[in-house]
């Protein structure tokens, strides 16, 4: 897959954790993961990049610099790049337009990005679309790339791919919607199909609702003792809940309430899996990014509870995405500065249902 020269070049590139961000209009860049120090819950964040008014950061990916990035497009294709092949840029720089890195067709955009170490023969990619279609395909089918990309999923007209993750074949999948519904079912309920297949219905949507994300749930009691589902709404309300709140059911179904939604909270913007030893990186439609400890987000037993304010937003701003990152070890000076920032801010009261 790689030439001898490329392998030699890679050996010269230092291996490190990095953050890949992409804007709504397709500007992508790579930064060292320690650019963003963790703040405390309720913070305002800091500017992530300089953008046009109508643009905003839409995706945040935490990756190893030597890992593969699989970039999935609105037309159901996939491209592969090494993370270090994404040009590095400063925190406030716009970055490089993705059309300069990928051979995209007119009107085609990148809608999902994942990071993988390699193309293991016993692993799978699970794909979920905005309309609730789910598909499972062997990861090995994506190893050999073409310059113009490869078909990843056959989409229905008007649908788009929004979630992709790697699995081992024996997990559960939990799909979440903008109106706060969550459906958990066994991965084995979705049979393995080829790259050009459509997939099957993963969740039944109510009129006007749409899928905003999904998570992979390991069926290991020890794993579930330390991992929680994090939900964040557009207006900065978030919570952690144990996966035991969600019973596995047969696919497809309409799910159960996973987040209480109101005008005050805004729609659910996404879901993720995190431990108390990890950080969360939240990004707004105005380009502001905040990094907070996952342990700062309240752990609530009720799956339908509202949650607490995790980010104070500027007027008319909304959270558009968030990602889980490894915790950064901070020195005393950094921690003191972060504490000084948050002491001056008035934290919103807890809003628990």
Image (cartoon, helix red, strand yellow):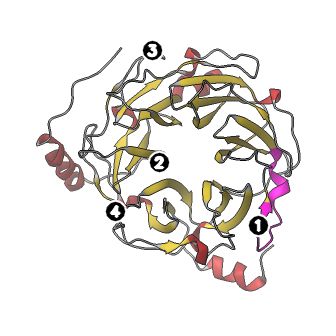
Give whichever of discs 2 and 4 has the lower sequence position. Answer: 4
**Does 340 appear above or below 267?**
below
Q: Residue at x 46, y 46 (%)?
A: 321
Q: Residue at x 66, y 23 (%)?
A: 184
Circle number at residue 301: 3
**Does 336 appear above or below 223?**
below
Label 2 to label 4: alpha-carbon separation: 31 Å
SS assignment at label 4: loop
Range drawn in magenta: 137-150
Label 1 to label 4: alpha-carbon separation: 31 Å
**Callout 2–callout 4 Cβ contact below 8 Å:** no
Circle number at residue 149: 1
Q: Position of residue 309 (x, y in %)?
A: 30, 31
- Total numbered labels: 4
Nearest to viewer (mark 3 / mark 1): 1
Give whichever of discs 3 and 1 has the lower sequence position. Answer: 1
Left or right of 339 on screen, residue 197: right
Circle number at residue 326: 2
Left or right of 144 on screen, residue 6: left
Label 2 to label 3: alpha-carbon separation: 25 Å
**Does 170 appear above or below 257?**
below
Residue to which mark 4 is pinned = 53
Nearest to viewer (mark 1 / mark 2): 1
Give whichever of discs 1 and 4 has the lower sequence position. Answer: 4
Using the rendered view, name the quadrant where residue 156 is placed. Answer: top right
Q: Residue at x 38, y 59 (%)?
A: 34
Q: Position of residue 168 (x, y in %)?
A: 76, 39
SS assignment at label 3: loop
**Callout 2–callout 3 Cβ contact below 8 Å:** no
Using the rendered view, name the quadrant where residue 106 is placed. Answer: bottom right
Q: Residue furthest left?
A: 344
Nearest to viewer (mark 2 / mark 3): 3
């Amino acid at each position: 897959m790689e030439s001898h020269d490329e392998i030699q070049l890679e050996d010269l590139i230092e291996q490190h954790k990095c953050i890949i961000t992409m804007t709504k209009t397709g500007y992508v860049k790579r930064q060292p993961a320690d650019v963003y120090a963790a703040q405390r819950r309720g913070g305002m964040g800091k500017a992530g990049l300089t953008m046009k008014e109508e643009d905003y950061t839409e995706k945040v990916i935490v990756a190893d610099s030597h890992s593969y990035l699989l970039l999935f497009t609105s037309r159901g294709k996939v491209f592969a790049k090494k993370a270090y092949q994404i040009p590095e840029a400063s925190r406030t720089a716009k970055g490089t337009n993705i059309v300069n890195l990928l051979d995209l067709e007119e009107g085609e955009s990148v809608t999902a990005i994942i990071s993988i170490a390699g193309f293991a023969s016993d692993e799978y990619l699970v794909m979920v679309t905005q309309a609730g279609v789910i598909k499972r395909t062997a990861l090995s089918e994506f190893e050999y790339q073409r310059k113009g990309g490869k078909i990843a999923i056959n989409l229905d007209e008007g649908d788009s791919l929004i979630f992709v993750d790697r699995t081992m074949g024996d997990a559960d999948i939990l799909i979440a919607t903008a109106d706060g519904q969550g459906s958990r079912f066994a991965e084995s309920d979705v049979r393995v199909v080829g790259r050009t297949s459509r997939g099957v219905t993963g969740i039944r949507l109510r009129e006007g609702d749409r899928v905003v994300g999904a998570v992979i749930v390991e069926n290991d009691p020890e794993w579930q003792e330390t991992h929680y589902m994090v939900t964040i709404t557009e207006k900065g309300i978030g919570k952690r809940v144990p996966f035991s709140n969600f019973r596995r059911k047969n696919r497809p179904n309409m799910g159960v309430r996973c987040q209480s939604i109101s005008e005050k909270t805004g729609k659910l913007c996404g879901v993720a899996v995190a431990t108390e030893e990890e950080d969360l990186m939240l990004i707004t439609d105005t380009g502001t990014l905040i990094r907070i400890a996952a342990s700062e987000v309240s752990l609530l037993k009720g799956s339908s509870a509202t949650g607490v304010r995790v980010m104070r937003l500027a007027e008319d701003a909304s959270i558009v995405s968030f990602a889980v990152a490894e915790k950064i070890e901070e020195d005393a000076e950094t921690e003191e500065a972060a504490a000084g920032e948050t002491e001056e801010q008035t934290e919103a009261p807890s809003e628990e249902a």
